[in-house]
Amino acid sequence: MRNGRRAAISGTAEWAPQRRWDAPMFGLEAYAKLAREALADAGMELGEIDGVLCTRLGDAPMFAPAAVAEYLGVAANYGEVVDLGGANAAAMVWRAAAAIEAGVCEACLCLLPSVPAPPEPGTKPRAQGWMLGADAWGAPHGQFDAPYGLINPNSHFAMVAQRYMHEYGLEARTLAKIAVQARENALRNPKAIFRDQPISIDDVLNSPLVVDPLRLLEIVMPCAGGAGVVVTTLERARRTGPRPVLVSGFGERVTHKSITYAPSLTQIPIAAAADRAFAMAGLGREAIDVASLYDCYTITVLLTIEDSGFCAKGEGGRFVEEHDLRFGGDWPLNTHGGQLGMGQGGAAGGMSHVIDAVTQIQGRAGARQAAGAERGYVTGTGGFMSEQVALVLEGG
Amino acid sequence: MMAEPPPRILPRPTPATAPFWEAAREHRLLLPRTAEGEPYFYPRAFSPGSLDPATEWVEASGRGALYSYTVDRRGTSPAFAARAPYVIGIVELEEGPRLTTNIVGCAIEEVRIGMALEAVYEDVTDEVTLVLFRPA
């Protein structure tokens, strides 16, 4: 508690990730649609909202929070655009919680629409943004990484996996288990793109190498989607909507853009973020009932478990082998199927982890409800293992 | 009809990085260094960690060891599709800094973390030379 106030997540909205999106919408339209759904879930009126958090939108590439406030018809006391990639969701939640606890605002929309816009007349569809900003004049990575092919996240994360395997002797089968158990959870999630397709360890190991040592089934399926949450005061969240979920601890760490210049390839930024989040919450790692860890790749999950302090350095492989990571297992992880099993709904992918933990703590996970889910741990990972956020959540 | 593949991505030097790329054209590896004499990479107008205006350069040996690598099997970025499979590597130079490169001069199956490497220069155009590495 800070300033006598506590912030809590209330309503959620989440669209099932799809490879092809049948109903194109502009970013502001999709933001508004998610807002309707999240507010309805929270039992709140639009007029109660005085904080808007977003990432850059196609139809609002500049002044995005102002464009959102205007489009929605909201007078915001807090407007924020977050540019932390896959960490955006967790980063939005803690920024909203901190702003609410500081008394800046009362209720925030944290929404990440990520669907295609209607086709622009007179233009040809083109591959969007595969240079990820490296083609900007003067961008260091355009000079020192892109000419050698180090552009796509796949290659960056693959080099993390390769180095970790070299230093710690991790087996490919262990990473494969992460994908397999995520998929088992996905079979119980009607919104998961792979809800009808179980896989085995051998399926993962026999899937094609994409970027050594990572294989196709260890890499998220890029999709369109959208998701978000309402964050408000605990007091307000108690009046309507689902069970409030307290944002009890949070931490963030940003160290590099390209993996080549990371302080370490095998000790990732989450370590500092997790320490801060658990200290703030006054909880130990053993208090966590359900974890939802950003899983763009299998290696991201293993290193996040390890460097978040759930096991000793170098023991992440053993931890994965020794625990049942399914929703009914002894260490429920990514009970929504993870992004590996659900599909990565573009910018909304990271929000799936926030909503996964929130849904468990609210007791709304249905066929994949974990027993006794009171406390959750959520991470976001953006860029190239560049920017990570940790959240500790508790039932309120 | 197939669309033209995207052109090769080439570095566009800036005032702060031009000495590095000019040296590469002469097949020399130049590293920026801090006011304390510590080499670093990549070149910047201000040294990372101290923000001293960076004007010092040191010639590197061009030797190093492979720190990590991947084989891009598919050309994960469009400009590289025609070259796949190829090796993207991070080399740790004798002088300490790490840089991004491609490993050439050996079969993909022979690439190993820790292998000794030396710089080799690919003159891509009259203006641009890339710094690659091969087994030493």
Image: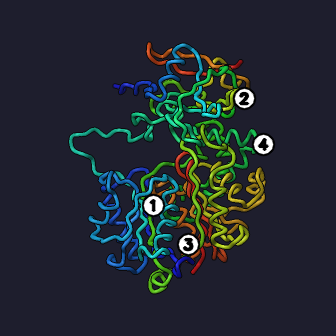
Circles 1 and 2: CB atoms closer than 8 Å: no
Where residue A46 appears, as percent x and y from the top left, is: 33, 76
Q: Quote the CA–CA distance across marks 1 and 2.
A: 41 Å
Q: Which residue is mark 2?
A: B112
Up-down relation of residue B26 to residue A31 (above or below): above
Left or right: A32 in relation to A287: left
Q: Which residue is mark 3?
A: A247
Identify which residue, A324 or B107, lies in the foreground.
B107
Q: Which one is in front in this view, the residue at disc 4 or the one at disc 3?
A: 3
Q: Secondary structure at mark 3?
A: strand
Mark 4 vs mark 3: which is more N-terminal? 4
Q: Quote the CA–CA distance across marks 1 and 3.
A: 25 Å
**Do dots 3 and 2 share one subunit?**
no
- The part of the image, by quadrant, that contains residue A196 is bottom right
Circles 3 and 2: CB atoms closer than 8 Å: no
Q: Return the chain for callout 4.
A: A
Q: Secondary structure at mark 2?
A: loop
Could you tell me the amino acid type at mark 3? Val
Q: Which residue is mark 4?
A: A169
Q: Return the chain for callout 1.
A: A
The number of numbered badges drawn on the structure is 4
Q: Which residue is mark 1?
A: A16
